[in-house]
Amino acid sequence: MASRAFGVINSASNFIRVEGLHDYRPIGAFSFLGRFRVIDFPISNMSNSGFERIQVCLNSRPRSIVEHIGSGRHYNINSKRGAIQMFFTQNNGASSIYNTDINAYLENIEQIERMPQEYVVIAPSYMIYKQDYEALLDAHIESGTDITLLYHKVDQAKEYFRGCNIVTLNKQKGVESLERNMGTAKERNISMDTYVMSKEIFIDLIKKSRKESSAYSLADMIALSCKELDVRGFQHKGFFAAITSLDDYYRANMELLDYSTSMEFFRPEWPIYTRTTDACPTQYVHGAKVVNSLVCNAGLIEGTVENSIIGRNVHIGKNTVVRNSIILAYNDIADGVYIENAVIDKWAQIRHVKKVVSGSVTPAYVKRNDRL
Amino acid sequence: MAQTNMLAMILAGGRGSRLHELTNKVAKPAVAFGGKYRIIDFPLSNCANSGIDIVGVLTQYESVLLNSYVAAGGRWGLDTKDSGVFVLTPREKADSGFDVYRGTADAISQNIDFIDAYDPEYLLVLSGDHIYKMNYDKMLRFHKEHNADATIAVIGVPMKEASRFGIMNTANDGRIVEFEEKPPKPKSNLASMGIYIFNWKTMRKMLIEDMKNPDSSHDFGKDFIPVMLDEGKALYAYEFKGYWKDVGTIDSLWEANMDLLDSENELNLADTSWKIYTEDTGMTPAYIAESAKIDRAYINQGSAIGGEVKNSVIFSGVKIGPGAKVTDSVLMPGAVVLEGATVTRCLVADHVRIGRNVTVGNKKSEEILLVAKSIKGEDK
């Protein structure tokens, strides 16, 4: 049955910057676990929830996401009845204060108004979680509330989830306020920037925003409206990550190295779709040593890999050790290199520098296409 | 309809009975190979990479799975406006009765109407059960340069094995003077690869003759090619250099998989300029656990490994429990080896479960053991 809602995939606010990786692509296009891109998760959630119409906001450097999403066929969206639309903003300098999600909606308001569905689910392209939006929609309709907001209870809000909003709830799960996480307390309800509302309220919020501030985002508008509108929280359970910093990105990848967490998250009945590259299996030669790692295809592993994520088409040379690291696709790590606690962006070659190590919590970062 | 320069027909109907239980449910071309592929991905990807737009797949044995598999031409990029993969099973026609394909040549004869619809100049005939990468466009160039009526791809095999193949005896310029099927005393080592390019007009006439001939078994090797030679047609041998393997038996299928363990192997599936395309299983990367030990392996995404893997090829969906040992083996999609089990010199079929502490296969066995049924192990 076709869903009563259409989906909107939102991009991260301007103040969210992920060191290194973000210089080259929006967060939605970040590689995740070597094989996926972050945006695969919200789109797959929508596709698995039976959504046929999905609109994706692109506010900066759209090339990689446009290539990745393409026709959307690989997300199992019906090619005749369904569609993925991409909303560009004319004004797409990433740092401009006017470059907000609301701007993208306003520039494409006709497309939104034309949607035949009564409801909309808005989900972010910079968070990773699983959620059946059809169940969320049912709960929303049953409660009779204006807006349902998805949140997750975390106990590491001091170190992580910076840049996310925190939700204050009353006893009836009514949202009292929505404010930026400044890292002042450990336990917080983190807003998952995911909302269910009627199309009518959505359009109303977009249009009203211009009277308030040209720099407002949808989250700002909801924060402003939670006194007059009935906004209620819906608690999410299970794996949840917000890719709002390099630390958060690293931690999210590493958490899924735990087999039971990973098996619980990736279920055959809730597939996460992505674009295939037709990469062959990975070659492990005599002398390779790999433990507690996730390894993508088309690799050549000659050295040691421990507690790491190896993207596709990666070469790990002889007598090389990769530990607690994320090696993105097409990297060539030559012989005798030691890498610990690092994120190596795509297409790098590490040959002359024999040691890439970070001593702190924040991983070392090697730039895309870099020669070391 | 748009005129197609060269149309390809893949002969995929073989029973493959020497693959035993592996082909009980699927035709040989749909059998799994190389960690993620099916055998037929090779000719289909070769066609796509050689710029051939229209591919007919001729099949009659156990073809439901094969049909649905190849019908999704998009997997190989054969889904643009003027391209497509067509499954051609024997069908009833207005002017003649319903008949199975009586031979390889007959399979083409029965589809003359299909081929005519595209009005090709050349017809490429392929077999659906070989592992190789080949640019058919280069072969077509050779065919044109020699003004040939037919060109047959050949590969040099060791002289002592030549009597197992169909052998082409050629003149210095490559013109075929004689064809001998499995000769006891071979005069040359150029074996036919079962890859032919024909000028469609000439071939069409000859196929109609062949259909009428009551003495013909309607086979390319036995009937069609010898008649062409008798009639003095210009047949040339195009020598292919590279990896080529018939995977018609359990041992040869296992061997071809083992060839991939050499990181310098000639097939080189990692070459991005000539990719082999296949269905996407949408799985997570391979998970290699803390307890795992991997020594020389070819492992696909979507597998989870907790035990020891040595000299083995592991397909997607395979699970190997802690303390299990897999050596010199091929584990096909979804095969499960539970804790403490030992698998040696085996080819484990799709979704077979090897129970806890079970031992299968033997290091010293001459033949490779096909494990096609699950084996119960000790209870926990």
Image (cartoon, coloured by chain):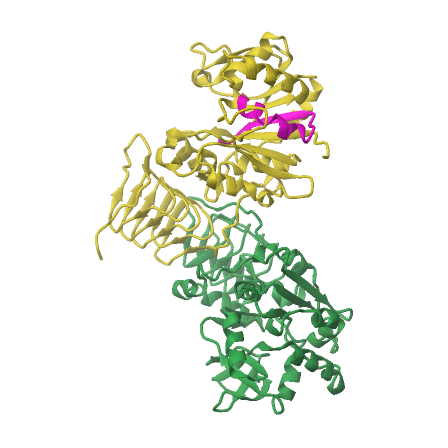
Chain colours: A green, B yellow
Picture layout, residue B220 above or below residue A125: above
Q: Is any atom of residue A77 visible in this view? A: yes
In this view, which residue lies farthest toward the right?
A90
Labels in figure, total = 0
Picture layout, residue B250 above or below residue A344: above
- Residue situated in front as seen by the camera: B35 or A224: A224
Picture layout, residue B259 above or below residue B124: below
Per the image, is B49 magenta?
Answer: no
Where residue A174 sits in the image (x, y, percent)?
53, 88
B254 on left or right of B39: left
Per the image, is B118 magenta?
Answer: yes
Magenta stretch, residue numbers: B106-130
Q: Is any atom of residue A184 visible in this view? A: no
Q: Residue at 62% x, 67% y: name it.
A: A27
Q: Residue at 66% x, 35% y: name it.
A: B51
Q: Quadrant of the C terminus of chain A?
A: bottom right
Where residue A240 sits in the image (x, y, percent)?
49, 72
Q: Residue at 28% x, 32% y: name it.
A: B365
Within the image, what quadrant is residue B198 found in?
top right
A207 on left or right of A120: right
Within the image, what quadrant is residue A369 found in?
bottom right
Where residue A336 sits in the image (x, y, percent)?
50, 52
Where residue B175 sits in the image (x, y, percent)?
62, 13
- Residue situated in front as seen by the camera: A237 or B223: B223
Q: Quadrant of the N terminus of chain A?
A: bottom right
Within the image, what quadrant is residue A124 found in?
bottom right
